[in-house]
Amino acid sequence: MKWFPMLLLSSYIGLMTCCFHASRWQTEFERVKCFRNFSQSYQDCTLQSLFDRMHLGSTNQYYVEFGFHLNDVLGTAKFGQPRKRHPRPGEIPPYGGNTELLRRQGWTGLRMDGHEHINKDPVIYKEFITPQNVAHLFQKYKVPIEPDYVSIDIDSCDLWVFLALTDAYRPRVISIEYNSNYAFEESKTNVCVRPDDAKEPFFTSKGHIGDGASFMAIHKAARRRGYEVVWVDAYLDVFLVRADLLCDFPKVNRFRSMTVLVLHEDRVTLHFTTSAKEKWVVDYV
């Protein structure tokens, strides 16, 4: 039975090639001359590379994005125009959809926003997302249990929404906006609900600027839900891939340089008062 060892070797190679080599991809992707078509920064480029069939690949090509504004489909650069990898804070425009390029490439999905509702293409449903209702909303709009991609960007309770969502749904890739002002070791996040202040349950409910979550807080939460950080788009998004899809667990220290990056410094000084921080921001352990 000389064929048996060869069969085992073939099966072993098959197992080794069906998972995503994240560390190898990171090294290759760092050398890529990136682009953005519709995204705020280089999320277009990151997603295009991740979902390439030579890397992670896609399955159902279904996306979910929230919050999402109409301006996000207008584009922030000429189609396919390459730019420097990390623009200065002042160069980042105030809008940009992470899923618009995917949509134009044939993907389908769901977009929701707490303020806008649009019945024409692109469809945007007016929904205010909370940790308590996010899974229900996915069920309401018949989102598959394992969509290829979910983008979370609500400038406040992003971390808690992620935790609630992944109790019921298992997206293959998730991006979460992070607060780049925090240091690498700081594990901080917004409190979603204040038991002593039921009239103001969310930090953004009266027009405050949400503090969001630090990189380290997102990393810890991701590990608890079976996800790993594979990439960070400076100032903006942390990209997570489900751990069971990975061949290796990348080292997060390589993203240290993506922290202590001050974004919207004037707005931070205006709104992030000491009393607001004490009320709405906590350590995530």
Image: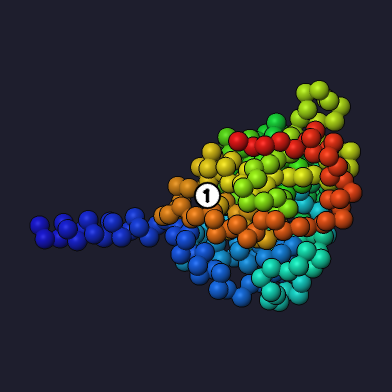
Residue at (85, 30) in percent of width and height: 200
Horizontal side of 144 relative to 42 (left or right) equals: left
The image shows residue 197, relative to residue 55, as above or below, that is above
Residue for point 69% across, 68% down: 86
Name above or below for residue 75 compared with residue 145. Answer: below
Residue drawn 83% across and 56% down? 265
Q: Which residue is mark 1?
A: 228
Q: Nearer the viewer, residue 183 or 229?
A: 183
The answer to which quarter of the image holds residue 84 is: bottom right
Seen at 76% across and 57% down, the residue is 262
| Vertical relation: 215 (above or below) 160 | below
Disc 1 marks which amino acid? Glu
**In terms of depth relative to the viewer, which is nearer, 155 or 280?**
280
Tell me where residue 281 sits by quadrant.
top right
Quarter residue 205 falls in: top right
On the rendered structure, is 87 left or right of 241?
right
